[in-house]
Image (spheres, helix red, strand yellow):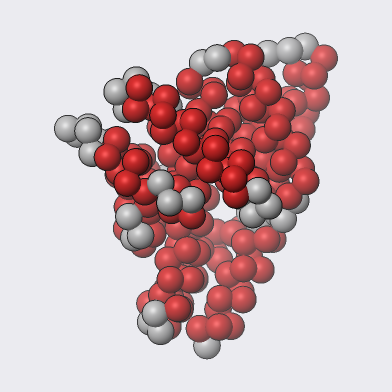
Amino acid sequence: MLDELIGEFLEHPFWMETPCRWVRGRMRLARGDAKGAHDDAERALELARAAKDPQVLWPALAFAARAFLPTDRQRADDHVAEILSEWEAQGCPLSSESDWTADAAVVIPLVGREAEFLAGAGRAQKPWPWRQAASAYVSGNPSAAAEIYREIGAGPDEAFARLRAADKLVREGRRAEADVELDAALSFWRSVGATAYVREGEALLAASA
């Protein structure tokens, strides 16, 4: 469906191409199609910069940071830094957090910007679940993040957090707990054909045996 929509947008431009690109890009990452994910990230960011609207720019930056993190950590850091700077400048609003915080949370601990995000997240008197989940992930508690994503109904974000939780638990020697997280993650990833994450989960499963 996204392929068809994006094809139509190439002939008849429409702002919805940007979110369609980052959604398809996430699917491509999950299938191990790094080049396709990079292509979608580049195009989404190009369109978002032209629009100059944080509701599309911040999610595009966050997805691009996630997509390029394995190959260009400096670029990923630059994108996250841009989001956090603008977010702080605008008073850390809750708007569009469902579109950017989960991607950004994956990158933030790996580029050393945990304190910046958590300081901003802490400014909300009643943070909504997306911010709570991202804060848990950034704080090093992916299991807690997964539970919040489960309550939200965000299956891919829950499953990814459970993969990270399993990896952490395996490294800590907590194999039984790791297997619980892996079973839940793999059940979801197999159901949607996310072959890259399935391979990662199965490798962790073997490591925890």
Name which residue lies at 66% across and 20% down. Answer: 47
Q: Nearer the viewer, residue 84 or 32?
A: 84
Locate residue 8, reporting x and y percent. 78, 19
**Residue at point 49%, 31% (across, down):** 82
Which residue is found at the position 66% from the left and 68% from the top? 199
Horizontal relation, residue 143 to residue 122: left or right: right
Residue 147 visible, this orientation: no
How many numbered circles are shown? Answer: 0
Q: Is residue 99 above or below residue 118?
A: above
Image quarter hosting the N terminus: top right
Name the foreground residue: 14 vs 173.
Answer: 173
> Quadrant location of residue 101?
top left
What residue is rendered at 56% in x and 66% in y?
186
- Determine whether, in the image, residue 129 is placed left or right of residue 62: left
Give the residue furthest to the bottom: 209
Closer-to-camera residue (208/65): 65
The image quadrant that residue 7 belongs to is top right
Picture coordinates of residue 208 (x, y %)? Answer: 50, 83
